[in-house]
Image (cartoon, grey):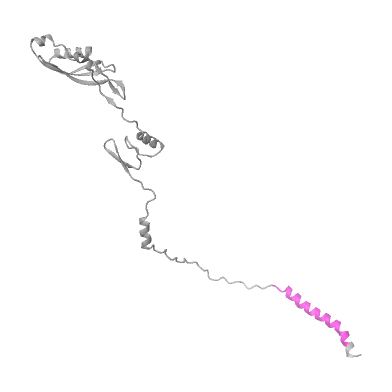
Amino acid sequence: MSYANEQKRASPAGMAAAIFFNGSIILAVALSPLVVEPRLPGPITMGRPIPLDPPPEPKQDDQKEARELPPIFDIKPVTKVLDDDLEITTSSDEQITGPIMDGGGDDDMTEIVRDIVKPPTPIFKAAERDARFARNYQPDYPVGMLRQEIEGSVTVRVLIGTDGRVRQVSILHATDPDFAKATERQALKAWRFKAATRDGKPVEDWQTLTVRFDIS
Protein backbone atom coordinates (compact mmCIF):
# COMPACT_ATOMS: atom_id res chain seq x y z
CA MET A 1 0.00 0.00 0.00
CA SER A 2 1.37 3.33 -0.88
CA TYR A 3 1.59 6.37 1.33
CA ALA A 4 -0.98 8.18 -0.72
CA ASN A 5 -3.59 5.56 -0.13
CA GLU A 6 -3.01 5.62 3.64
CA GLN A 7 -3.62 9.40 3.66
CA LYS A 8 -6.90 8.95 1.86
CA ARG A 9 -8.14 6.28 4.31
CA ALA A 10 -7.17 8.28 7.48
CA SER A 11 -8.69 11.54 6.31
CA PRO A 12 -12.38 10.88 7.20
CA ALA A 13 -11.58 9.79 10.74
CA GLY A 14 -9.40 12.78 11.35
CA MET A 15 -12.08 15.07 10.07
CA ALA A 16 -14.62 13.59 12.44
CA ALA A 17 -12.26 13.87 15.38
CA ALA A 18 -11.59 17.51 14.62
CA ILE A 19 -15.28 18.30 14.35
CA PHE A 20 -16.01 16.51 17.62
CA PHE A 21 -13.25 18.36 19.43
CA ASN A 22 -14.30 21.74 18.20
CA GLY A 23 -17.98 21.07 18.98
CA SER A 24 -17.08 20.04 22.53
CA ILE A 25 -15.28 23.33 23.09
CA ILE A 26 -18.18 25.36 21.73
CA LEU A 27 -20.72 23.45 23.84
CA ALA A 28 -18.62 23.88 26.98
CA VAL A 29 -18.40 27.57 26.41
CA ALA A 30 -22.12 27.83 25.74
CA LEU A 31 -23.05 25.93 28.90
CA SER A 32 -20.68 27.76 31.20
CA PRO A 33 -22.43 30.35 33.57
CA LEU A 34 -22.11 34.03 32.64
CA VAL A 35 -20.08 35.83 35.29
CA VAL A 36 -20.72 39.56 35.53
CA GLU A 37 -18.50 41.59 37.75
CA PRO A 38 -20.70 43.70 40.10
CA ARG A 39 -20.30 47.46 39.81
CA LEU A 40 -19.17 49.06 43.01
CA PRO A 41 -21.09 52.24 44.01
CA GLY A 42 -19.03 55.35 43.52
CA PRO A 43 -19.20 58.67 45.33
CA ILE A 44 -22.35 60.79 44.79
CA THR A 45 -21.61 63.93 42.85
CA MET A 46 -23.45 67.04 44.15
CA GLY A 47 -24.19 69.99 41.88
CA ARG A 48 -23.04 73.46 42.78
CA PRO A 49 -24.43 76.84 41.63
CA ILE A 50 -22.61 78.45 38.78
CA PRO A 51 -22.11 82.15 39.41
CA LEU A 52 -23.44 84.40 36.67
CA ASP A 53 -21.80 87.57 35.61
CA PRO A 54 -23.74 90.69 36.78
CA PRO A 55 -25.52 92.71 34.07
CA PRO A 56 -23.45 95.52 32.68
CA GLU A 57 -23.97 98.91 34.28
CA PRO A 58 -25.82 101.39 32.03
CA LYS A 59 -23.66 104.05 30.60
CA GLN A 60 -24.10 107.64 31.75
CA ASP A 61 -25.17 108.64 28.25
CA ASP A 62 -27.95 106.03 28.31
CA GLN A 63 -29.17 107.22 31.75
CA LYS A 64 -29.21 110.82 30.58
CA GLU A 65 -31.14 109.90 27.47
CA ALA A 66 -33.67 107.92 29.54
CA ARG A 67 -34.24 110.87 31.89
CA GLU A 68 -34.77 113.25 28.99
CA LEU A 69 -37.48 111.12 27.36
CA PRO A 70 -40.89 112.84 27.58
CA PRO A 71 -43.68 111.08 29.55
CA ILE A 72 -46.18 109.01 27.62
CA PHE A 73 -49.15 110.83 29.20
CA ASP A 74 -48.93 114.47 30.18
CA ILE A 75 -51.64 114.91 32.86
CA LYS A 76 -52.22 118.46 34.01
CA PRO A 77 -53.99 118.57 37.40
CA VAL A 78 -56.88 120.97 37.78
CA THR A 79 -57.90 122.27 41.20
CA LYS A 80 -61.60 122.55 41.95
CA VAL A 81 -63.23 124.13 45.01
CA LEU A 82 -66.04 122.27 46.79
CA ASP A 83 -68.49 123.87 49.23
CA ASP A 84 -66.20 126.95 49.56
CA ASP A 85 -63.99 125.00 52.01
CA LEU A 86 -62.83 121.76 50.41
CA GLU A 87 -60.36 121.42 47.54
CA ILE A 88 -59.51 118.42 45.40
CA THR A 89 -57.24 117.91 42.40
CA THR A 90 -58.51 116.16 39.29
CA SER A 91 -57.41 115.63 35.72
CA SER A 92 -60.81 116.45 34.28
CA ASP A 93 -62.14 119.77 33.03
CA GLU A 94 -65.63 119.05 34.35
CA GLN A 95 -66.84 121.16 37.26
CA ILE A 96 -67.18 119.17 40.47
CA THR A 97 -69.64 120.23 43.14
CA GLY A 98 -71.03 118.70 46.28
CA PRO A 99 -69.38 116.86 49.21
CA ILE A 100 -66.48 114.44 48.79
CA MET A 101 -67.36 110.79 49.39
CA ASP A 102 -65.12 107.81 50.03
CA GLY A 103 -65.26 105.49 47.02
CA GLY A 104 -65.48 101.80 47.77
CA GLY A 105 -67.89 100.26 45.29
CA ASP A 106 -70.41 100.81 42.54
CA ASP A 107 -72.89 102.48 44.91
CA ASP A 108 -70.29 104.96 46.11
CA MET A 109 -69.28 105.75 42.53
CA THR A 110 -72.95 106.35 41.66
CA GLU A 111 -73.25 108.88 44.50
CA ILE A 112 -70.08 110.65 43.36
CA VAL A 113 -71.38 110.86 39.79
CA ARG A 114 -74.65 112.32 41.05
CA ASP A 115 -72.73 115.01 42.90
CA ILE A 116 -70.60 115.78 39.85
CA VAL A 117 -73.63 116.20 37.56
CA LYS A 118 -75.59 118.09 40.22
CA PRO A 119 -77.97 120.56 38.56
CA PRO A 120 -77.15 124.26 38.85
CA THR A 121 -78.56 126.35 41.70
CA PRO A 122 -81.96 127.84 40.79
CA ILE A 123 -82.02 131.57 40.08
CA PHE A 124 -84.12 133.38 42.69
CA LYS A 125 -85.52 136.89 42.31
CA ALA A 126 -87.07 138.51 45.40
CA ALA A 127 -90.46 140.16 45.41
CA GLU A 128 -90.62 143.93 44.98
CA ARG A 129 -93.25 146.63 45.36
CA ASP A 130 -95.47 147.22 42.35
CA ALA A 131 -95.05 150.85 41.31
CA ARG A 132 -98.60 150.95 39.97
CA PHE A 133 -99.92 150.74 43.56
CA ALA A 134 -97.37 153.02 45.21
CA ARG A 135 -100.06 155.45 46.41
CA ASN A 136 -101.69 152.64 48.40
CA TYR A 137 -98.57 151.92 50.41
CA GLN A 138 -98.99 154.58 53.14
CA PRO A 139 -101.65 153.66 55.77
CA ASP A 140 -104.18 156.18 57.03
CA TYR A 141 -102.91 158.17 59.97
CA PRO A 142 -104.71 157.11 63.18
CA VAL A 143 -107.03 159.98 64.17
CA GLY A 144 -106.13 159.91 67.85
CA MET A 145 -102.39 160.00 67.10
CA LEU A 146 -102.88 162.77 64.57
CA ARG A 147 -104.78 164.96 67.08
CA GLN A 148 -101.98 164.51 69.56
CA GLU A 149 -99.44 165.15 66.82
CA ILE A 150 -97.57 161.96 67.67
CA GLU A 151 -95.26 160.56 65.02
CA GLY A 152 -93.87 157.07 64.83
CA SER A 153 -92.93 154.07 62.71
CA VAL A 154 -93.76 150.41 62.24
CA THR A 155 -91.53 147.58 60.99
CA VAL A 156 -93.41 144.60 59.59
CA ARG A 157 -92.55 141.29 57.98
CA VAL A 158 -95.04 140.29 55.30
CA LEU A 159 -95.54 137.09 53.33
CA ILE A 160 -96.16 137.87 49.66
CA GLY A 161 -98.09 135.27 47.69
CA THR A 162 -97.61 134.20 44.08
CA ASP A 163 -100.35 136.69 43.08
CA GLY A 164 -98.46 139.64 44.62
CA ARG A 165 -100.86 140.11 47.51
CA VAL A 166 -99.92 140.10 51.21
CA ARG A 167 -101.06 136.89 52.85
CA GLN A 168 -99.61 137.33 56.33
CA VAL A 169 -98.31 140.24 58.46
CA SER A 170 -95.97 140.02 61.43
CA ILE A 171 -95.27 143.17 63.50
CA LEU A 172 -91.58 143.36 64.38
CA HIS A 173 -91.54 146.85 65.93
CA ALA A 174 -94.05 149.69 66.45
CA THR A 175 -93.86 152.93 68.41
CA ASP A 176 -97.59 152.65 69.18
CA PRO A 177 -100.24 149.89 68.83
CA ASP A 178 -102.44 152.22 66.77
CA PHE A 179 -99.68 152.58 64.19
CA ALA A 180 -99.27 148.79 64.13
CA LYS A 181 -102.98 148.16 63.56
CA ALA A 182 -103.20 150.74 60.80
CA THR A 183 -100.16 149.25 59.01
CA GLU A 184 -101.41 145.68 59.26
CA ARG A 185 -104.85 146.64 57.95
CA GLN A 186 -103.40 148.56 54.99
CA ALA A 187 -100.94 145.79 54.06
CA LEU A 188 -103.60 143.09 53.88
CA LYS A 189 -106.01 145.34 52.02
CA ALA A 190 -104.05 147.42 49.52
CA TRP A 191 -100.36 146.47 49.25
CA ARG A 192 -99.39 144.92 45.90
CA PHE A 193 -96.07 143.41 44.85
CA LYS A 194 -94.46 141.75 41.91
CA ALA A 195 -94.23 138.16 43.08
CA ALA A 196 -90.85 136.54 43.66
CA THR A 197 -89.66 133.99 41.08
CA ARG A 198 -87.40 130.96 41.07
CA ASP A 199 -86.18 130.03 37.60
CA GLY A 200 -88.94 132.24 36.24
CA LYS A 201 -91.76 130.61 38.22
CA PRO A 202 -93.72 132.65 40.85
CA VAL A 203 -93.06 131.64 44.47
CA GLU A 204 -93.93 133.00 47.91
CA ASP A 205 -91.47 135.36 49.57
CA TRP A 206 -91.05 137.12 52.92
CA GLN A 207 -90.20 140.84 52.92
CA THR A 208 -89.37 143.19 55.80
CA LEU A 209 -90.60 146.79 55.40
CA THR A 210 -90.78 149.91 57.55
CA VAL A 211 -93.64 152.41 57.48
CA ARG A 212 -93.23 155.89 58.93
CA PHE A 213 -96.01 158.14 60.28
CA ASP A 214 -94.97 161.76 59.92
CA ILE A 215 -97.04 164.90 60.26
CA SER A 216 -96.17 167.15 57.38
Quadrant that contains the C terminus: top left
Q: Toward the viewer: 197 or 135? A: 135
Image quadrant in which you'd find residue 187: top left
Look at the magenta stretch and give its main secondary structure: helix
Which percent across, then down, holds residue 198? 30, 24
Please report the bounds of the magenta region as a residue range.
Answer: 6-33
- Whole-percent x and y of residue 47? 49, 66
Q: Residue at x 41, y 37 (%)?
A: 106
Q: Is residue 193 visible?
A: yes
**Is 61 in front, or is 156?**
61
Quadrant location of residue 154? top left
- Extreme residue toward the bottom, this view: 2
Q: Residue 201 lies in magenta, yes or no?
A: no
Residue drawn at the location 79% of the way across and 80% of the way down = 21
**In the picture shown, does residue 13 fall above or below 90?**
below
| x 35%, y 35%: residue | 116
Q: How many marks?
A: 0
In the figure, is residue 82 to the left or right of 144?
right
48 w.r.t. 84: above or below: below
Q: Position of residue 179 (x, y in %)?
A: 14, 14
Observer-nearest residue: 206 or 212? 212
Specify the quadrant of the image occupied by residue 67: bottom left
Q: Quadrant of the N terminus?
A: bottom right
Hey, which residue is sitting farthest right in the picture?
1
Residue 11 x/y as whole percent: 85, 84
Q: Is residue 30 left or right of residue 101?
A: right
